[in-house]
Amino acid sequence: MKSILGFGRTEEDTGTNVTITEEPPAEMPRCSLVNVRFPGKDRTYSYYNDLFDLHEGDLVFVSGKLAGERGVVDSVNYRFKINPTAYQRVIGRIVISMKGTYAPVLDKMVSIDREAVAPETFRSWVIPPADDGEPPEYIKGEGYSFDLEHFAECPEVEEAILNRALDYCTEGRVCYLSVRDHVGTAFVEGTKWYQVDFRYEDGYVRDMYCECPYPGLCKHSIAVLVTLREILKRIGDRDFTAMTGGFFIQMMTAGRQRIMLLPPEDGEQTA
């Protein structure tokens, strides 16, 4: 089995706790023509917007060929005359609202606060709204169940899929993972974003499902099992919320949050 110790970090890297204390201001719709940059594509395109009050640096979802990609508003123009049918539109603004205290664990920023980022909030950051505003409906069969400590020994776990899942862990693709009142939710970045749902209690995972189309236990689910096991080894058997460090910093910066830096031991610093 591949080694995943540290998920790209060393055990000695204790880091600094971060407390997030402010939420972004409320928005009011304002018509505009905006240039949106897509970092993953290294391209900028113009979109019509009549749903949000947008500003430079805002993260948005758009319609058209780049639907599902997060874009960054480069500029906003309020003086324009266009035929709106000639333009794709901004269909979602990613509202970054983060609170709570987070500490580095492996490659994640982890919080045990109840006010930490909820699953539905994270989903709104990575998955664009549906055209009709309604979330998709899923039909479930029987979910997978495991002893978390020994899941790799189960016959459902194929070696090739396990190895790919370990790659996902090393690459930080389990970007979000939370357990709240025995309800677990994760978001894994694959060819698209997939949500993994499960229940966790006393070392056992039950009713695990993934949205992906793979007809068996998939790499997304196994990557979540590995990540869950490794985090709980370090924080104890408790509720938590975790985000990959790079994604955490990206969202915190985009939300223009105010933070307080807390050393691992007693004492405080403000920033």
Image (cartoon, rainbow, N blue to C red):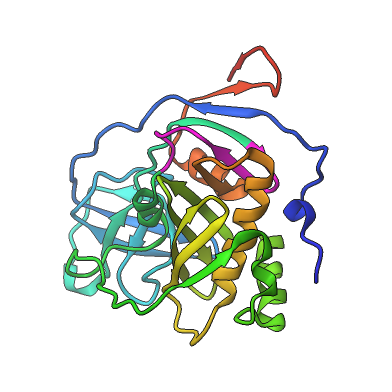
Q: Residue at left 38%, top 38%?
A: 97
Horizontal side of residue 204 vs 56, given as left or right: right
Q: Quick check: 251 above or below 198?
A: above
The span picked out in magenta is 104-117
Q: Is residue 96 left or right of residue 155?
A: left
Inspect the magenta stretch and tell me whether residue 105 lies in it: yes
48, 118: nearer the viewer? 118
- Which of these two is toward me, 176 or 42? 176
- Among the 4 quarters of the image, the one containing residue 262: top right
Q: Residue at x 72, y 75 (%)?
A: 163
x then y, percent, for residue 88: 27, 70
Kindly tell me whether residue 41 is visible in this rendering: no
Q: Position of residue 184 (x, y in %)?
A: 45, 55
**One can see residue 168 in this view:** yes
As for residue 196 lying within the magenta part, the answer is no
Q: Position of 230 compared to 244: left or right? A: right
x 39%, y 33%: residue: 115
- Residue 250, x across and y down, in percent: 54, 46
What residue is at 42 percent from the left and 59 percent from the top? 126
